[in-house]
Image (spheres, rainbow, N blue to C red):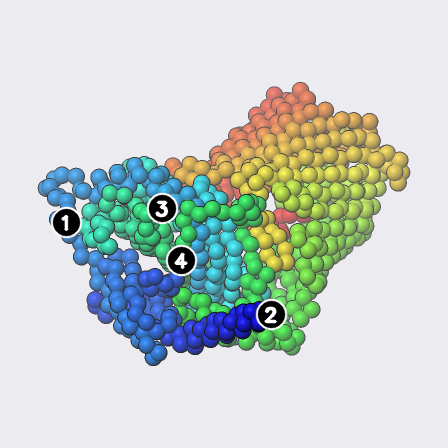
Amino acid sequence: MKHDFCMRILLLKLLFLSLFLFAADQSFATKVSGIIYDADRKILPYTTVSVKSKSVNVISNEKGFFSFEVNPGKYTIVFMHVGYKSRELEIIVSEKNLDLEITMELNSLTLDEIMIKPGGEDPAYEIIRNAIRSRKDNAGAIASFSCQSYLKGVVRTNAYPETFMGRKIDFEDGDTSKQKIIFLSETIADIHFRQPDETRVNVISTKVSGQSNGFGLATPFLLTFYDNIVSIPRVFNPRGFISPIADGALSFYKYKYLGAFSENGFLVNRIQVIPKRDWEPLFNGYIQIIEDSWKLHAVDLYLDKESQLELANKLNISQQYEYIGFDNWTLKSQNIELSANIFGFSADGIFTTLYSQYRVNNEHSKNTFGKTLIRFDSLSNKRNDKYWAENRPLPLLSEEIADYRKKDSLELKRQDPRYLDSLDKIQNKITPTAVFLNGLNFSKRSSSASFSLEPFLKDISFNTVEGWSIQASGSFRKDLKGRKEFSVSPVIRYGTSNGHLNAYLNSRYQFGKKYANSIGLGFGKRIFQFNNRNPIPQIMNTFSTLLDGNNYMKIYESHFFQLNYFKVLGDGFDADIAFSYQKRSPLENLKDINLWTDKEKLNNITPNYPTEIAISNMSPNTSSTLGLRIRYRPGEKYVEYPDRVVRAFSKSPLFTLQIEKGLPQLLASVSNFAKWKFSISHDINFKMGGEFRYMLQTGGFFNKTFVALPDYNHFSGNLTRKANPYVRSFQVAPFYALSNTDPFFTALFLEHSFNGLLTNKIPLLRKLNLRLITGANMIHTGNRNYAEAFVGFDNILKIFRVDYVWGTTDWILPRNGIKIGIRGFNNLFND
């Protein structure tokens, strides 16, 4: 007993001693800070600062300022910056804060190591050849690693227009200045990697200015120049850019040896990288390569418009690597700076990442890698200012501190319904562009609700059945608690010539704790196209009828009811099941039709049914059907938020199986058929070779005892100038010529976008950054075959695409024509 009592006293003493030492460790921490300059007294931003034998890794901000805390003692600090001599500084830290002023010197380059002979090959080429030969080995030298990353992203405007597309530009921050921060975010995350390409990011903390529930930039842009093609976000160029040490780099780059310097016992070569040709996806700038191992020591490269950079005017990438022992070099810091000027918007962005606490060639648990690509900790966006003050390695600028305070204050202010109402009044203004092209949007933020109206050009249309039709359509959406959402879209339509009034309503309820599932319900009386997917936009049919007498859109009237349920099953699967009821009535053309053109054009008008597949209009009929669709994408990756799971991407094709069954006698239905369709679709990025897209479809009817015209297998044809959706439509086939009830069909859609390849050799086209596109579509059904080929240019003014299409078949006249695709204005062309 006495022995037990003494042991307890000893344990208590040890506990109190530990608590005392912990408190002392916290209370006596001293702040070490300073500003970093170059030899000319210019601020040197984004310099990495490390303390030897301590897990202290910080980086200087745009003003060259750095700061960290350590306990009193003697330390060695290491300063590293691309192009500058690494500097070590011994300091003695007392209980008083220590302010430093650091001067960094440019690397003293010497040419003594390699003799350059007049007229001989520049020594840089042999170094590059060695780096290319060693590229794969160096890329895979570290089989796996784990590290912590800190990422800060800042976007500032320099100028922007008062309005855009008819809407007032308002960042809702109470600041009318043209120069200001519009985005500020920080993220601390653990990164796990295993060769060849397995990645897992666990986000510990994330912060977005003005968005307390925001998640910011989750994934650090971990660029590697050991890849042949350096991939950056595809908005800048879907092809990527050729690395200066890619296998074929010598065909694209010139190199100039600038000299070498010694750092910690390693000889480092500095080489200038110069593109051989303009308008190729190539870098400009400098790289530093370590002698003998031929590993990267640092890069400082940039891209501009002549590099086929899109969206931005210039993008600069600088990286600094660090030796961590055992011949291992790891990425220490990365800085990406970009500037953009488009449509009157001028902005600069800076994205700085610091990597630390590396553990290389480590064993990962079985659950580290899998279907989850990014996972956010449940408290990731709940950390307080004290946490960030203690863990942020990059000191904030005064304007960034002010931005956090201002926008956090504004976020609290936005909880006041009166303030939200004032914002709504500004944004809910009616403009001509919105009325005619974009549609009107009205929000009620205080109640998390919004209401929208379709554009005038969509709600006013002409056809040979109704004459002028006037439609009032809109949508109401309400955000509910959690991830739930409810929307309802009522439509009232009146035909001025046939006097028919139609009204119907579609609604949707979204729910689900993990995945976003939904239930949809629609009912009423409406106009349907015989192909219920509405392949012919009303606006295109209006002009083609009034100007040329071509009434492409074939319609009928129906009382209907439809119910569908969609569910994400996980592991790449989702499914939806749908029940549809239609009581159909045929419609006929008006007797008197007035066109905007010659009366001779009246001869072009065809009956109001698909004349390609029918010799008369359908009889009134009632149809009840049940459909099931299952989709599967192998290897799909997910992002796990604290309250939901979102699909990220997959490198695999999408497989889709659809089955539809007519239900005879149910609700007086006469439909008696069963059909199926299986499809495979995929987008493949060949990087320098462009992007290849395809869709393969096959299917047919098991049973076709009674199949009304709307229940055929329909394929989207097109006789208008506007292109139909690519890689799933035929661009010059008559709209219903390919519709069928055959027991088997096979269709294939192919498209290849060269994304600048070839066109960058033609002076005018390369400056316009046009993309050559080519492809083919084909179908075999029953005893019929049809094929078409096309070639065209995309990225015209960033909006348009123009193709010339040839169609060929042995059962209808060959067709060809120009098709114009329009990026945007989807609301106007989707019925």
Residue at the image position 42 percent from the left and 46 percent from the top: 361
What is the x, y in percent for residue 547?
Answer: 62, 43
Determine contact: label 3, label 2, CB under 8 Å.
Answer: no
* Residue 111: numbered disc: 1
Helix or strand or loop: what does disc 3 sit on? loop
Residue that label 2 marks: 1
Quadrant of the image occupied by residue 150: bottom left
Mark toward the start of the polypeptide (3 vs 1): 1
Helix or strand or loop: what does disc 2 sit on? loop
Front position among marks 3 and 2 = 2
Mark toward the start of the polypeptide (1 vs 4): 1
Q: Is residue 392 at all visible to an observer of this figure?
A: yes
Separation (CA) of disc 1 from disc 4: 34 Å
Quadrant of the image occupied by residue 654: top right
Q: Is residue 172 at all visible to an observer of this figure?
A: no
Q: Amino acid at mark 2?
A: Met
What is the x, y in percent for residue 520?
Answer: 75, 50
Who is closer to the viewer here, 486 or 575? 575
**Mark 3 crowdedness (10 Å alpha carbons): few <14, some 14-19, many ≥20:** some
Residue that label 3 marks: 225
Who is closer to the viewer here, 666 or 830? 666
Direction from residue 712 to residue 249 in the image, left or right: left
Quadrant of the image occupied by residue 627: top right
Looking at the rendered image, the quarter that the N terminus falls into is: bottom right
Front position among marks 2 and 1 = 2
* Residue 356: numbered disc: 4
Determine contact: label 4, label 2, CB under 8 Å.
Answer: no
Helix or strand or loop: what does disc 1 sit on? loop
Residue at the image position 59 percent from the left and 61 percent from the top: 378
Front position among marks 4 and 3 = 4
Q: Amino acid at mark 1?
A: Leu
